[in-house]
Amino acid sequence: MCRTLCAVLIVCGSFIMAQAQMTRGTRMVPSGKGYGIPGSALGDTVNQGNGIDYNGGRVMPRNVKVYLIWYGNWTSGPSPSDSQATVDLITTLINSIGGTPYEQINTTYGDATNDVTGQVSLGGTAKLPLYPNGSGLTDADVLTVVKNLITRGRLPLDSNGVYFVLTTTDVGETSGFCSAYCGWHKRANINRIDVKYSFVGNPDRCPSSCEVQSISPNNNSGGDGMASLVAGELNATVTDPDLNAWFNTGGLENADLCGFKWGQLLGGSIGNGGYNQQMGGLNWLIQTNWENARGGGCDNFLGGPFWPK
């Protein structure tokens, strides 16, 4: 994306000023929770013509490290999916998603300096089984969990990483988990470093809101549902890490535009073990992602058909 964007900005600047859609004043910006909120303009918005706009912020370049923070009882929690099986499942996803045709969709995004590479790897894990911040987390609590693990040396401080706080079914998030969102991402300064972090709860807490299959590809409804939510938050974070890079005029990011859209299935059916991705030797049902090319649309892999057609 940087290669295209830089050429447009440098070579065709006069054309942009004459032809691009520019927005100033109050407008919708991302909340990080799947919906837009009113906010002041971040600057001139250049519509790239693919249904999503570049707003001047940075993307996450190079290989992005993912840090998994397991909060709650992931050994014998109240739901069968509050288990080591789910821990293993999400770990396998992160270990296998980098560089796949699915993750390469994000390479259609960039800023004036860097492109998203689609490369992702596991940076580290931590378990917090004793509910140090209770079972009703606030947004501030989620940040505290991340900050404490970094400042106490259990996880590294990584400006090009994403820290996921993953909770068992007996843990709520008071700002709207299960009612307003299924996951979210934000950023914060920790020791003067820009840190990106995300919350994703086990969707078995509210299957009617946050998961689509009780019979799932890996016989783990919560873990399989979590996998799609983690993938979506990862997509949004690498392309809009500080909530000021890529989103549309309604404040929706790439993953928001494709939430709970599955595209072409490779086997099964939705609700009965349907899957649309194969990674790490396993089948997955992962939401599509918005490709910032060819006019824009949700697809399962870079250059694939857009869904719904």
Image: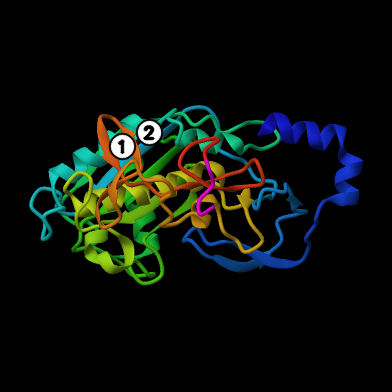
Left or right of 9, for residue 76: left
Camera-nearest residue between 172 and 151: 172
Left or right of 287, for residue 267: left
Q: Can you see residue 147?
A: no
Camera-nearest residue between 18 and 296: 296
Above or below residue 22? Residue 231 is above
- Disc 2 target residue: 97
Above or below residue 171? Residue 98 is above
Badge number at residue 279:
none
Q: Which residues are magenta?
A: 305-309
The kind of secondary structure element at disc 2 is helix
Characterize the local packing of mark 2: few (<14), some (14-19) or many (20 or more) Cα atoms within 10 angstroms.
many
- Disc 1 target residue: 93
Task: Indicate the quadrant containing the N terminus: top left, top right, bottom left or bottom right.
Answer: top right
Residue found 15% across the figure and 49% down from its top:
74
Camera-nearest residue between 37 and 229: 229
Residue found 81% across the figure and 37% down from its top:
9
Left or right of 187, for residue 137: left
Residue 193 x/y as whole percent: 51, 40
Q: Name the image quarter holding residue 201.
A: bottom left
Characterize the magenta stretch by its predominant secondary structure.
loop
Camera-nearest residue between 265 and 21: 265
Q: Name the image quarter holding residue 111.
A: top right
Characterize the local packing of mark 1: few (<14), some (14-19) or many (20 or more) Cα atoms within 10 angstroms.
many
Above or below residue 126? Residue 53 is below
Q: Is residue 152 magenta?
A: no
Amino acid beneath label 2: Ile
Q: Is residue 306 magenta?
A: yes
Amino acid beneath label 1: Leu
- Mark 2 and mark 1 in contact? Answer it, CB < 8 Å: yes
